[in-house]
Amino acid sequence: MTRIEAAIKDRLENGFKNWNGGYDSWLSWCNTLYDDASIYNVYGHRLTLKQYQNMMGDLFKKQDIKLGKFHNMIIADNWAAIRYDVEVTEIATGKTIVQQSMEFVRFKETPEKGVIVDEGWATSTVPLSA
């Protein structure tokens, strides 16, 4: 495994720990994983960092979102593909669904933050609703 591949693996594994701490924890981690030039494509929508943060803020107000285990993680050069479980509980109803998500992410190295997302693409078996 190359140095950048090891850094990407570390980012992905630590990201799950931070995500499951709620929106504020996710937002803090998010600010270390992305920069203003990062793009995230979610369910066909191309989002800037700010748009992605706002979308997730709206979701966290309505849903408790927990990332589960990795099913697959493939890292090659500056690319990663991951498949994992997401447990979504509607706050208003308590109804929970488990979905599988798939992401493809191209990373870049920066002097300020190290390895960060350049552009990512994500989809799930059941889209989250804002």
Image (cartoon, grey):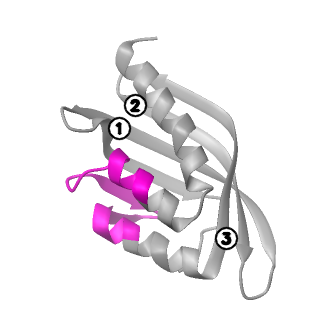
Above or below residue 130? Residue 22 is above
Q: Nearer the viewer, residue 20 or 109?
A: 20
What is the spatial separation of the Cα atoms under label 3 and label 2, in whole angstroms? Answer: 29 Å
**Dividing the picture into quarters, in which one does residue 2 lie?**
top left
Residue displayed at 29% across by 68% down: 50
What's the residue type where badge 1 is placed? Arg
What range is drawn magenta here?
28-53
Q: Are marks 1 and 3 in contact (CB under 8 Å)?
A: no
Q: Is residue 75 above or below residue 15?
A: above
Mark whose residue sits in front, 3 or 2: 3
Which residue position is annotated with label 1? 106
Q: Judge from the rendering whether residue 82 lies leftward or rightward of residue 68; answer left or right.
A: left
Left or right relative to 53: residue 48: left
Does residue 48 appear in the picture of this structure? no
Q: Which residue is mark 3?
A: 64
Q: Gap between marks 1 and 2, in whole Å? A: 5 Å
Q: Which residue is mark 2?
A: 79
Among the two numbered marks 1 and 3 on one chain, the one whose residue lies closer to the N terminus? 3
Q: Quadrant of residue 49?
A: bottom left
Residue at (71% x, 82% y) in the render: 91
Q: Work out whether 36 lies above or below 119.
A: below
